Image (cartoon, rainbow, N blue to C red):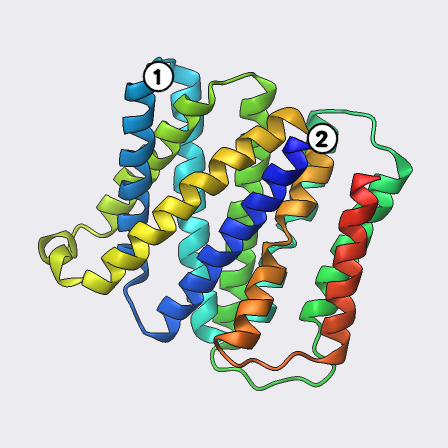
């Protein structure tokens, strides 16, 4: 039961963070700077925690695995922010949430495990609901549509790959703390390189710093729950639950960004909730 709650907690944290990314895109804030402050904040928090608890040990493979996760996740977030600039948050987030398809297929091949029929039905219901939510019966003219869909796909692939590698880390019984420290450390170094021109005037990005710090705290909580859920629960169920962060973004889009919810999107949300129940049976 704890892994299930941890997966839901991850979905909530990721959903709030993605909503903040959309808000930042609307305000034309610097995407890379937000990610930079976010990663450094999370890195400091996790590093302090590991030193206080004395849990950190240096092993090469977990460190390299975590660093790769950090770089891919940072790239996925940047592409997501670019997509938010070109399209509505509700549709963008649900398209990206379909990375669960990549993860479920890859992990079922690489890490075979017995999955009950009801769980499989729940997984397909969630995926089907995701498709319904982003469907547009009437084509909407969108500025730089090709850039938008490309950014969505790149974010989907990057974040989906993160899920597969994280499962590999738990499968190999890598330390949570080592992976988290190296994940945020690797991402922070990568983003520092991308934002090297902005570092000299980083203190002028006060709003980006505040948003980055908040996202960093939520991300630290979210990824801690993520790794716990993967370790204790079946990945084929954990990933679809985490993909529910798109519902959080959808609700935020209605309240904050005043995006209108169509009837078929409401049906998609109901189906998504039904899918979660089926994955728990």
Q: Which mark is residue 234?
A: 2
Residue 88 can be seen, yes or no: no
Give residue 193's quadrant in the image.
Answer: top left
Give residue 59's quadrant in the image.
Answer: top left
- Horizontal placement of 171 versus 143: left or right? right
Residue with the mark numbered 1: 56
Crowdedness near tag 1: few (<14), some (14–19) or many (≥20) residues, C-alpha within 10 Å: some
Residue drawn at point x = 28 percent, y = 64 percent: 30
Front in this rendered view, residue 120 or 44: 44
Crowdedness near tag 2: few (<14), some (14–19) or many (≥20) residues, C-alpha within 10 Å: some
- Horizontal placement of 57 versus 122: left or right? left
Mark closer to the chain start, 1 or 2: 1
Residue drawn at point x = 73 percent, y = 64 percent: 269
Residue 11 can be seen, yes or no: yes
Residue drawn at point x = 74 percent, y = 72 percent: 266
Measure how far apart labels 1 and 2 are at the Cα level: 26 Å
Find residue 159 and report its horizontal and vertical position in percent: 53, 46
In the displayed structure, 119 sits above or below 243; it is above
In the displayed structure, 191 sits above or below 109; it is below
- How many tags in the picture? 2
In the displayed structure, 264 sits above or below 233; it is below
Tag 2, which secondary structure? loop
Find residue 27 and report its horizontal and vertical position in percent: 33, 74
Tag 1, which secondary structure? loop
């Amino acid at each position: 039961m704890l892994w299930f709650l941890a997966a839901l907690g991850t979905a909530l944290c990721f959903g709030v963070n993605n909503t903040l990314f959309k808000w930042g895109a609307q305000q034309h804030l610097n995407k890379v700077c937000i990610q930079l402050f976010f990663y450094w904040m999370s890195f400091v928090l996790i590093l302090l925690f590991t030193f206080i608890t004395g849990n950190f040990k240096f092993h090469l493979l977990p460190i390299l695995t975590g660093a790769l996760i950090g770089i891919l996740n940072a790239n996925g977030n940047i592409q997501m922010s670019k997509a938010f600039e070109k399209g509505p948050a509700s549709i963008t987030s649900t398209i990206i949430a379909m990375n669960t398809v990549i993860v479920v297929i890859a992990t079922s091949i690489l890490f075979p495990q017995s999955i009950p029929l009801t769980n499989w039905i729940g997984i397909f219901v969630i995926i089907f609901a995701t498709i319904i939510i982003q469907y547009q019966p009437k084509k909407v003219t969108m500025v730089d549509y090709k850039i938008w869909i490309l950014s969505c796909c790149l974010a989907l692939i990057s974040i989906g790959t993160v899920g597969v590698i994280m499962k590999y880390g738990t499968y190999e019984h890598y330390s949570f703390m080592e992976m988290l420290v190296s994940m945020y450390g690797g991402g922070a170094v990568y983003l520092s390189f991308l934002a090297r021109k902005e570092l000299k005037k980083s203190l002028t990005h006060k709003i980006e710093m505040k948003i980055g710090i908040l996202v960093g705290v939520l991300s630290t909580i979210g990824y801690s729950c993520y790794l716990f859920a993967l370790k204790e629960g079946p990945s084929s169920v954990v990933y679809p639950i985490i993909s529910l962060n798109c519902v959080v973004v959808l609700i935020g889009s209605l309240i904050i960004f005043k995006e209108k919810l169509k009837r078929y999107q409401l049906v998609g949300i109901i189906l998504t909730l039904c899918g979660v129940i089926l994955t728990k049976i």
